[in-house]
């Protein structure tokens, strides 16, 4: 029965003070938000609503305390130096947090037309002039390599276009999948060798910022534009969530099934899945390290307390349950800043075989919350195992060391910390991730991994690798009582 008008309820508490919906700028503008200017200063645009914006900068030379009171001015948004919005505004909030100066700005006259602003931002990006040559010019050997990649991919696409596309509408879904599986089966080994050849070419120059940017720009114009016809490449490159490596990308790799509206797009998607096999290998290795350590506990009757930082879809729960004894129970704390990832992880965990042995809870907190002395940290001490599959790849050396020390503190005596990181070897993922997909990470060697454990003097340190020799694992075992 429908409610009468007098039965309808409004908001309560502070929620009574309505605010227009805010959108994260990176998501709204597909990873390329405009720059914000106010009171003569340049800011990163963090979030935006129809009535105002939140902005941040860590480069302003400010006193210890932000200026008090409202400041009237003009809010300008620019993309690549071109103004796409300008209107009177007032600064209504300011604060300094962790070295970042952030402000809230409210428009005083016109409002944002967000749809129009997104179109204007995209149009400005699309109309940027393309220089015929980046500086420095990529060496001929690299151009020849990219041509070899295109020739390889194009050879398979030509077969599909010539022989399979004319009968595609007559194929059942099962027949389509079987054909793609057969094509990928034939292509996988030479494709892997091509990826390793790319790594060989870029590893020596990856620390040369100017040359790296030149090679990346060339690769994106020549190779990426062909590969993004596949869903795996497109999602990684265009980053619809505003950042690379979201949980849907991880699921593409874990599922390993053809995705796309045509055989051509399915084939390209599966080439991306092949390139992403180290993601699956990483997950399987972490699951085994967790199960192995759980088997060494003396108090086996108690549930194993495990915490995953940056859990994503948490697909490792399935092999953990499958490969551990039926007598082992698990208390998992899944931590991620993306609510959709946590929702997927918890929902899928409930349907796993053996889920009756699993108690999973989720924490939707940020990376900064984990590092700080927040109430969150007090709730998650005394863990048997803490692990992070890929978060440290994004952290600079000093921040990575700080993160690892903090995660080590969460362990109880006898606990284990497991940190994975992409390596810098030819068997790794440097070329497809950094150069094809603009997916920037810290690709570390064994000495880099050991250096991250500095300051954890009492731990037993191991550096391990996955079976594909693409991922390093830093394993820290905390002494028992």
Image (cartoon, rainbow, N blue to C red):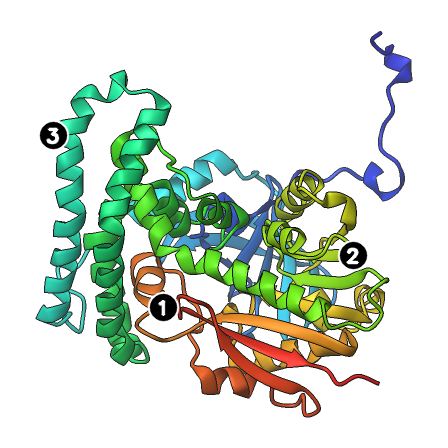
Residue 67 versus residue 478 in the image, above or below: above
* In front of the other: 115 or 262: 262
Q: Residue at x 38, y 35 (%)?
A: 259
* In front of the other: 94 or 407: 407
| Residue 428, disc | 1
Tell me residue 110's x, y (percent).
56, 38
Q: Residue at x 67, y 61 (%)?
A: 308
How far is mark 1 from mark 3, CA to CA?
A: 34 Å
Identify the secondary structure beneath mark 3.
helix
Dot 3 crowding, Cα within 10 Å, few <14, some 14–19, many 20+: few
The C terminus - image quarter: bottom right
Which residue was labeled with disc 2?
Answer: 331
Snapshot quadrant of residue 163:
top left
* In front of the other: 84 or 319: 319
Which residue was labeled with disc 3?
Answer: 162
Identify the secondary structure beneath mark 1.
loop
């Amino acid at each position: 029965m429908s409610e009468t008008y007098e039965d309808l309820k409004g908001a309560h508490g502070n929620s009574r003070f309505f605010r227009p919906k805010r959108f994260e700028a990176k998501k709204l503008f597909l990873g390329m938000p405009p720059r914000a200017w106010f009171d003569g200063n340049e800011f990163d645009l963090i979030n935006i609503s129809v009535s105002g914006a939140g902005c941040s900068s860590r480069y302003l030379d400010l006193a210890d305390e932000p200026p008090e009171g409202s400041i009237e001015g003009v809010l300008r948004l620019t993309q690549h130096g071109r103004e796409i919005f300008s209107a009177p505004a007032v600064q209504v909030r300011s604060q300094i947090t962790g070295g970042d100066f952030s402000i809230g700005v409210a428009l005083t006259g016109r409002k944002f037309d967000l749809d129009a602003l997104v179109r204007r931002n995209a149009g400005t990006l699309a109309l940027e002039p393309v220089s015929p040559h980046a500086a420095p010019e990529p060496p001929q050997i690299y151009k020849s390599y990219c041509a070899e990649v295109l020739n390889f991919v194009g050879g398979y696409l030509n077969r599909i276009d010539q022989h399979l596309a004319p009968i595609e509408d007559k194929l059942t879904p099962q027949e389509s999948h079987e054909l793609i599986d057969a094509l990928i089966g034939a292509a996988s080994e030479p494709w892997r060798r091509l990826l390793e050849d790319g790594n060989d070419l870029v590893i020596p120059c990856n620390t040369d910022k100017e040359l790296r940017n030149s090679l990346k720009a060339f690769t994106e114009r020549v190779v990426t534009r062909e590969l993004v016809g596949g869903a795996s490449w497109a999602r990684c490159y265009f980053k619809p969530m505003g950042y690379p490596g979201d949980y849907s990308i991880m699921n593409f790799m874990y599922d390993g099934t053809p995705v796309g509206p045509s055989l051509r797009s399915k084939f390209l998607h599966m080439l991306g899945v092949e390139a992403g096999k180290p993601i699956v290998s990483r997950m399987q290795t972490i699951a085994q390290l967790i199960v192995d350590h759980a088997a060494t506990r003396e108090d086996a009757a108690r549930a194993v307390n495990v915490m995953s930082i940056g859990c994503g879809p948490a697909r490792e729960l399935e092999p953990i349950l499958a490969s551990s004894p039926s007598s082992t129970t698990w208390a998992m704390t899944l931590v991620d800043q993306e609510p959709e990832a946590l929702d997927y992880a918890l929902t899928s965990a409930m349907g796993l075989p053996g889920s009756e042995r699993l108690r999973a809870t989720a924490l939707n907190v940020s990376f900064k919350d984990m590092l700080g002395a927040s109430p969150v940290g007090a709730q998650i001490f005394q863990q048997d195992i803490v692990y992070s599959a890929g978060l440290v790849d994004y952290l600079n050396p000093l921040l990575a060391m700080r993160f690892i020390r903090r995660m080590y503190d969460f362990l109880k005596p006898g606990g284990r910390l497991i940190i994975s990181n992409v390596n810098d070897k030819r068997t790794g993922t440097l070329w497809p991730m950094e150069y094809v997909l603009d997916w920037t990470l810290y690709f570390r060697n064994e000495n880099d991994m050991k250096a991250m454990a500095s300051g954890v003097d009492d731990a037993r340190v191991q550096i391990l690798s996955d079976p594909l020799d693409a991922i390093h694992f830093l394993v820290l075992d905390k002494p028992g009582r």
